[in-house]
Image (cartoon, rainbow, N blue to C red):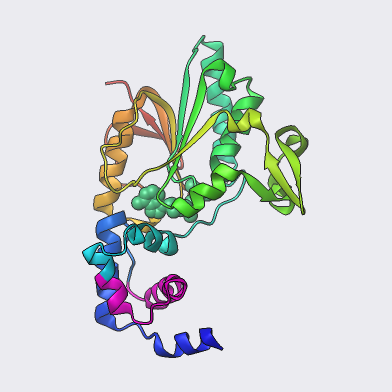
Amino acid sequence: MAIAFYKAIMQLKSREFESFRSLVYETSGINLGEGKESLVSSRIGKRMRILGMEDFQSYLDCLKDGSAGDEMVHMLDAISTNVTSFFREPEHFDFIREKAGEWVRAGQKRFRFWSAASSSGEEPYTLAMTLSECGLTSATDTRILATDLSTRILAAAREGVYASAKLASLPSGYASRYFAPAGGGTMAVRDSLRDMVAFSRLNLAFPPFPMKGPLDIILVRNVMIYFDNDVRKKLIDDCHRLLKPGGYLLVGHAESLTGLVTGFKCVKPSVYLKQAQ
Ligand SMILES: C[S@@+](CC[C@H](N)C(=O)[O-])C[C@H]1O[C@@H](n2cnc3c(N)ncnc32)[C@H](O)[C@@H]1O
């Protein structure tokens, strides 16, 4: 009843949509295109219901004047789309297994990876499983940095507990090797994987990023679709700076970087090699 009441009175005016659109772009680089009014209205409306607020303009005002503390963080949490899965776009993990094997055989002793829009953790934990299968663990100086804009989704990733059904896409034997039953039809990531991954909040719209390179592989997958070319270009350039010569940038299969990359060679669709200078 109360929700129906709020829905009835919460109509997003087009000038309010434009204000949210600018604010989201300025703070996250996310480019909410035309026709996203209903998405903005329902996601932000949900957040406003939690706060007991009824009108979009008042919410905008408190976001802009900073009177609501870290409400901007919650607003961006509400806006972001976090769809992901274990072994999403599995060819990337075949590629990583192949490269890690080559680097191990060549005597490399330190391995650094970055999952740059890690969402609820499936991507960095998939990376950790893939590397573990090559004998790379926290004991062999292998580290994965996993970052995202959304604090809500990072908390879920750190917790590392997933519905058993989500593990269906894992290769045979991985579920028992890398997860332990956690009750109520869920499975928890085992410490051997947790020890490899460090989670942190990081906004991809504001390079340069503070990490210490050089990195071996960076995954920036299925996030650049939300950015315009200006934000994409700056992000890719900073990935180039952070990678070692001979390191790789992996992007989502649907994300074309045509005209945006310099200093990289596309070695297969969605896989870019940082060339030696
Ligand atoms: C669709 S998910 C992709 C997850 C994973 N990389 C994959 O391919 O399955 C996009 C993620 O990007 C994050 N994101 C959106 N804008 C961001 C920004 N400016 N900085 C960092 N992360 C951002 C969202 O919070 C969300 O978790």
Is 155 or 79 nearer to us in this picture?
155
Q: Is residue 102 left or right of residue 163?
A: left
Range of residues picked out in magenta: 34-61
* Image position of 86 with respect to 218: above or below: below
Residue 123 seen from this side:
yes
* Image position of 260 with respect to 15: above or below: above
Q: Is residue 56 left or right of residue 85?
A: left
* Image position of 232 with respect to 65: above or below: above
The residue that appears at 55% across and 45% down in the rendered structure is 157
Quarter of the picture containing the N terminus is bottom right
Quarter of the picture containing the C terminus is top left
Q: Position of residue 193 (x, y in %)?
A: 62, 31
Magenta span has 54?
A: yes
Q: Position of residue 10 (x, y in %)?
A: 39, 85
* Image position of 93 with respect to 182: above or below: above
Q: Main secondary structure of the magenta part?
A: helix
Is 207 or 230 nearer to us in this picture?
207
Q: Position of residue 227 (x, y in %)?
A: 33, 55
Is 199 or 100 nearer to us in this picture?
199
Residue 254 seen from this side:
no
The residue that appears at 55% across and 32% down in the rendered structure is 95
Q: Is residue 171 left or right of residue 23?
A: right
Magenta span has 128?
A: no
Outermost residue, top side: 107
Q: Position of residue 142 (x, y in %)?
A: 52, 22
Q: Is residue 197 left or right of residue 9?
A: right
Quarter of the view holding residue 8: bottom left
Is 101 or 268 nearer to us in this picture?
101
Quarter of the view holding residue 217: top left
